[in-house]
Amino acid sequence: MFRAKIRLNEQADVDVESLLLKKRAEREGLSAHAVESLIENFSLSVVPLIESGRLMKSQGSSFNVTRTIKGPVYDVKLEFATGSNQSVFAKIKNLIWGR
Amino acid sequence: MTDDSKLPAIRPSSMPASVSLSPTVSLDLSWLSEDKRAALLEEHARGMLDISRKAQEMHVDIAALTAALDTVSNTTLQAAKDGNSVTASHTQTTSVSRTEIIMGNTDAARVGKLTKSQTGETNWTPIYIIIGIIAVVIIATSLAK
């Protein structure tokens, strides 16, 4: 089972993120068919979130979304956040654990 | 019969003898001298202009807030319909009020309390904790020597 946790904001590039996820999934040994399904679901989930995130950010609202992209052989948790100031603990956590 | 031509001429005044305070109430100014009436009317006009400007500002602020809240609610609804767990918040301070709103389909939205980061305030508690830890380490190190 391929598991991943991805944090994104409104500045994310869908193509770049998809490519990174694809490489991770291939490295974990997912079949080409499963990778294709995962990337398709990922793009379908992320594109509207980025559009909404940009809209919300432009008017000063915060927008936090979590979603699990699940398939027979993958389980990807997506955390999308935009507009809100990160707490100090969150900044430290991100610094230590990365994205 | 009096001879009108011998009476002092009455100069017709262009100054209003009353001022309207509301659609149904007006204040009689006829007992005031023309100079005082002019000063009072000028002050009244200035006050009306101030009220009008404030009303315009409030109208613009309320229109902006309405548009922002519409966007938040529509975006949140769409994200929830798409199967996401979503929490959206918006904080806005206008000339009329300060509005804090949180909506979504998560527990955080259900509780309805905005965090300091969501309201845009700085939460100093972690900084104080870190400073406290550093102080304890420094004191412990100096005592150990």
Image: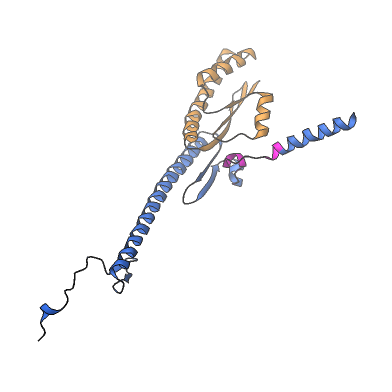
Residue drawn at point x = 39 percent, y = 53 percent: B55
x, y percent for residue A35: 57, 16
Q: Residue furthest right?
A: B145
The boundaries of the magenta stretch are: B112-127
Residue drawn at point x = 30 percent, y = 66 percent: B35
From what the image shows, is residue B54 above or below residue A24? below
Q: Is residue A7 left or right of residue B141?
A: left
Q: Quadrant of the C terminus of chain B?
A: top right
Residue drawn at point x = 47 percent, y = 43 percent: B69
Q: Colour of chain A?
A: orange
From what the image shows, is residue B68 above or below residue B31? above
Question: How many tags in the picture?
Answer: 0
In the image, B102 versus A67, the foreground residue is B102
x, y percent for residue B68: 45, 42
Indicate how the structure is coloured in the image. by chain
Figure quadrant of residue B107: top right
In the image, B44 versus A62, the foreground residue is B44
In the image, A27 versus B38, the foreground residue is B38
Q: Is residue B13 left or right of residue B29?
A: left
Q: Residue furthest bottom?
A: B1
Q: Quadrant of the N terminus of chain B?
A: bottom left
x, y percent for residue A76: 61, 25
Q: Is residue B126 magenta?
A: yes
x, y percent for residue B66: 43, 46
User: What chain is colored blue?
Assistant: B
